[in-house]
Amino acid sequence: MSAAPRTIRRRRSQVPRRALIGLGAFVVLFYSLAPLIWIFIASITPEHTADFDRAWLSNRQVTYFPDAPTLANYGSLFEAVPFGMYFRNSTIIAGGNMLLTLVIASLGAYGFVRFRFFGRSSFLVATLVAYTIPSVVLLVPLLVIFRTYGLNNTHLGMILAEATHSAPFVLLLLINYFSTLPRDLDEAAQVDGCGRLKVLWRIIIPLSLPGLVAGGLLAFIMTWNNFLFAFLLTSTAEVKTLPVIMRQFALGEPAVWGVSAAGAIVSTLPVALIFLLFQRMLMSGLAAGAVKG
Amino acid sequence: MSDIPIATVATTRRRRKRIDLFPYMLIAPICLLLAAVTVYPTLKAVELAMTNASLLRLQRAAFIGLNNFRRMLDDQVFLDGLWRTLRWDLAVVSLELAIALPIALFLNLNFRGRGFVRAAMMVPYITPPAVVGLLFLYMFDGNFGVVNDLLVRAGLIDNYIAWMSSPLASFWIVVSAMVWYGAPLMALILLAALQTIPGELYEAAQVDGASRWSQFVSITIPHILPTIFFLVLLRMIWMSNHIDMIFVMTGGGPGFSNHTEAVYSFMLTNQFQIGYASAIAVVLAAILMFVSAFYVRHLARNVLVNAS
């Protein structure tokens, strides 16, 4: 084929192609963002009966856009529901889980990648098997065990329970990451008099920062979003997390949809922002690691 | 393995004398933690499954052998639950694939703003599932849901419908919430697979005059088929274990219509019948273990290759 007909053909198909791409992009954006935009509109729609004593008197209607947008729902969210406390609990548990997971997973990944020892592959396979045990099986015994050791209704207990998902996931991620680093660097550092733990701290950790950020933040997001453990292992507002209150909202308590919508937005915003800020690292982490659930 | 030369035995013995504890100390924290929060609870689950334990009288739980498992055979909720679990798996996974594959193919094209669309595409997967449940309940609400309003405006229905009180409609609404949440991850993984296909293959096919469609059928599909197979398998396992979305949106109802086995076990736990709940969870896990053995083998092979 000569060059001339090709350019003509390309020019002719340029406009429809661009239109099709635009259409495709619109469909994808509509699919993924429309429900969230809809709940955002709900959250700025003034509630006619923002009255927690007579919540059943809702005269809410379908509103495509409010005449007088308001942030009042966000205010009542923090006044009427101990929403600040739930937010704090989510932050403590997700943050604590992130730190715990990062520390133990980077130690473990360093051990598995850089050392040969008796039982190495057995231990590795065991952690994988542990990862595939479904939460359904773990729920009841964890509840019983946590009661026995006084770990239910504590932040520590929640952090440990969430580690069943996040620790093996981050371990796998970091094993993949650490194994891409050349060994020569460790050896050079050891020649310079670094101890083996110092090699991890001085060489491996700084070089795998993107992997650590991805692993840590994904652990944070998973924990922030997880509902099951939070629902079953907590019974007091002192440790309940945002997904638990979201379920109460879904059940229609306190039946003020504007406030529930505001709650949904505030629960989603932190993780959505984290994701959008670090999207490149997080997406490669998600595509590489096998996410549970 | 079988015939170890004598020299090797000697070195092993010598090495054992000065066994290096350092790597064990490195893996100890994560292994101990996983032993405490997964291995021990799993054994405990099997033990509980053979008792009539109730959360209200845990101390007086009695060993009843396999009675819980026998009870399942007469339990209509359990028996119907097998079909309901399969129906849920198939509905969610096939719809996720039907949505994720076109999205992945689209995002594999080169265009300006692709990075932005790809990031926006992932937003549903980052949204907490409980919030997703709330979102869909709000959209399908019987009194002020936007879906009712649009359908009435389009003239498809005359009156607002209370969708969530119908067993079939509520099932499909939970499925669509789940699909909305889960399809982006599938699209992302498919996209990663698409990007490993060498571009020369398509160029060669173009030179040979192959049409777009035949390129898709004979190059694209064979390349991503293993990934698709793997994703379907994995999603089926996780969906069988899935509780969040169904429980948040329906509580398993109306009636028992959305009781998959996982949800049934969870509902029993909420009613304090933890012995029987464990038994159901153990049976579910045992069934799925056959499938997940594949997965573990694949993961293990990958990780062992990577780690060496």
Image (tube, rainbow, N blue to C red):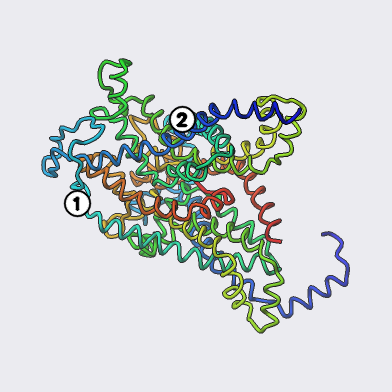
Q: In this rendering, is residue A113 above or below B238? A: below
Which element is circle 1 on? helix
Q: Quadrant of residue B146?
A: top left
The residue closer to the viewer here, B290 or A148, is: B290
Residue linked to disc 2 = B84
Q: Quadrant of residue A97?
A: bottom left
Coordinates of residue A200 in the picture (x, y in percent): 60, 73
> Which residue type carries mark 2?
Arg
Which element is circle 2 on? helix
Coordinates of residue A254 in the picture (x, y in percent): 20, 43
Look at discs 2 and 1 and give the one toward the viewer. 1
Q: Is residue A215 visible?
A: yes
Q: Is residue B67 visible?
A: no
- Mark 1 surroundings: few (<14), some (14-19) or many (≥20) residues within 10 A: few
Which chain does tag 1 point to?
A
What is the distance, in whole Å, between disc 2 and disc 1 at their CAs?
Answer: 42 Å
Location of the N terminus of chain A (image quadrant): top right
Which mark, by number, is residue A3?
Answer: none
Q: Quadrant of residue A122?
A: bottom right
- Mark 2 surroundings: few (<14), some (14-19) or many (≥20) residues within 10 A: many
Side of A41 where A137 appears, left or right: right
Q: In this rendering, is residue B64 above or below B159? A: below
Q: In this rendering, is residue B261 above or below A205? A: above
> Which residue type carries mark 1?
Gly
Side of A69 where A273 appears, left or right: right
The residue closer to the viewer here, A54 or B10, is: A54
Residues flagged by tags 2 and 1 on a common chain: no
Coordinates of residue A259 in the picture (x, y in percent): 22, 44
Q: Residue at x 53, y 67 (%)?
A: A104
Which mark, by number, is residue A75?
Answer: 1
